[in-house]
Amino acid sequence: MSQKSMMLYTSTWREKETFRLVPFTEECRFLEGIYDPSTKALALISKDHKESYHMVMKIDDQGEPLKAKRQRTNGSPYVEERRQLDTYYEWHIEKKEEIEEMIKRLAINDTFDFQKFLD
C-alpha cells in the first residue's frame, strides 16, 4: 500500500460537510477517497480496474434515452441493456478504528482534523 500519498481536504457529500482524499504523489494507488457522513464509511477508489457487467440506458440516434413502453421491474422508465464496462475497484471501510488507521497511513497532512467528521 502507498505510504503518505494522499492529501485530506474539506468537502461536501449529499449536502453534508465531510472530507475527501486526493492523490498527492504519482505512486499513489488510489484515484480518490471520500468519507460518507450518512453511512459513516470511507470509500477508496483504486487506479486498478476490472471488467464487469452493468445495466445502462439505451439511447436513440440523437443520444436521448429510449422510454420503455411500461415501467421496468427495477423502477426505471427507460429501456436498458447489459453492457460490459471497465469499473474501478472500490473499498468501503466502516469501522472507525480502521478508517483512522487508513488515514494515518495515507494522509500527508496529518494535522487535518478529520476526527470531527467521524464523531
Image (cartoon, rainbow, N blue to C red):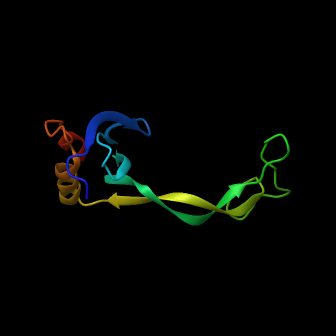
- In the shown orientation, is residue 112 left or right of residue 63? left
Residue 82 in percent (x, y) is at 70, 64
Count of picture labels: 0
Residue nearer the viewer, 109 or 75: 109
Looking at the image, residue 117 lies above or below residue 74: above
Residue nearer the viewer, 41 or 90: 90
Q: Within the image, what quadrant is residue 17 found in?
A: top left
Residue drawn at (21%, 44%), measured in percent from left and top?
107
Residue 40 in percent (x, y) is at 31, 52
Residue drawn at (17%, 58%), measured in percent from left and top?
97
Q: Which residue lies furthest to the front in this view?
A: 26
Looking at the image, residue 32 lies above or below residue 76: above
**Quadrant the N terminus occupies:** bottom left
* Residue 42 visible within the image: yes
Residue drawn at (29%, 39%), measured in percent from left and top?
24
- In the shown orientation, is residue 92 left or right of residue 102? right
Residue drawn at (53%, 58%), measured in percent from left and top?
87
Q: Within the image, what quadrant is residue 14 found in?
A: top left
* Residue 39 visible within the image: no
Looking at the image, residue 117 lies above or below residue 83: above
Residue nearer the viewer, 92 or 96: 92
- In the shown orientation, is residue 44 left or right of residue 77? left
Residue 62 in percent (x, y) is at 83, 40
Residue 27 in percent (x, y) is at 30, 49
